[in-house]
Structure formats: C-alpha cells, structure tokens
Image (tube, rainbow, N blue to C red):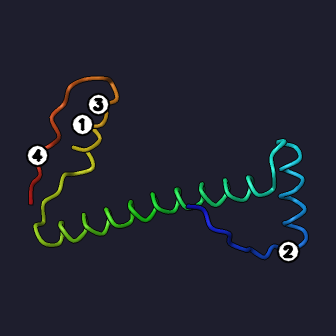
C-alpha cells in the first residue's frame, strides 16, 4: 500500500528535479521515488557489507584464523582465470 509523504525541497533542487523529469518524460514524483528507491537499496547494501565486515573482524579476533594476502591473490587469480580452485586453508 502506498501512502503519501511530503518532502520539502529548496527551489533550486525542485527546479532540477522538474527539469530532469521533463527531459525524461516522467513526472517529478516518479523521479523522486526512483531516486529514493535507488538510494535506499544502495545504502542497505552498504550497511550489509559493513555488518559482514564487523562479523568477520569479530570472528578473526576470536579465532585468529586468516589467510595471507598472497594466498588470497593466488586463489582469486585462479578464479578469475576460470579455474576451479579450492579456497586457501585458514591458519592462525
């Protein structure tokens, strides 16, 4: 269900949105909704990445398990070349 939400824009930004809407043959409402949807999706992905990094850091602090940069580079190079490659073994 869609509900109405108001947003205050300064005159310059409102004019820019309207100009873009005219150029794209869309409504200014569509432009703003699309912009908000893209922003929220991008920020959700950014937050998920941040949370994954925090969990990985906490896991490393608890276990000490890691791979070296060189080991990771070799593994990623094999994957990039299309080779089936086992991930490197973690060590303390």
Image quarter for residue 79?
Answer: top left
| Alpha carbon distance from label 3 to label 1 | 6 Å
Q: Is residue 14 above or below residue 27?
A: below
Q: Which residue in the structure is indicated by mark 4?
A: 89
Circle 2: element type: loop
Q: Which of marks 2 and 1 precedes in the sequence?
A: 2
Residues under labels 1 and 4: Cα distance?
A: 11 Å
Residue 65 % position (x, y): 12, 60
In the picture, the disc for residue 10 is 2
Residue closest to the eye, 14 or 76: 14
Picture coordinates of residue 8 (x, y %)? Answer: 78, 76
* Contact between labelled residues 2 and 1, with CB atoms less than 8 Å apart: no
Q: Specify few, some or many for label 1: CA neighbours under 10 Å numbering under 14, 14-19, or 20 or more.
A: some
Cα gap from disc 4 to disc 3, whole angstroms: 16 Å
Residue 81 figure quarter: top left
Q: Nearer the viewer, mark 3 or mark 2?
A: 2
> Upstream in the sequence, badge 4 or badge 3?
3
Disc 3, SS: helix
Q: Which residue is labeled 1 in the image?
A: 75
Give the residue pinned by disc 3.
79
């Amino acid at each position: 269900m869609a509900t109405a939400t108001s947003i205050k824009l300064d005159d310059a930004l409102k004019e820019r949105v309207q100009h873009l809407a005219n150029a794209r043959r869309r409504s200014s409402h569509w432009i703003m909704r699309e912009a908000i949807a893209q922003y929220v999706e991008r920020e959700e992905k950014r937050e998920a990445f941040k949370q994954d990094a925090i969990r990985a850091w906490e896991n490393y602090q608890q276990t000490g398990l890691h791979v070296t940069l060189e080991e990771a580079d070799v593994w990623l190079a094999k994957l990039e070349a299309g080779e089936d490659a086992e991930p490197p073994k973690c060590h303390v």
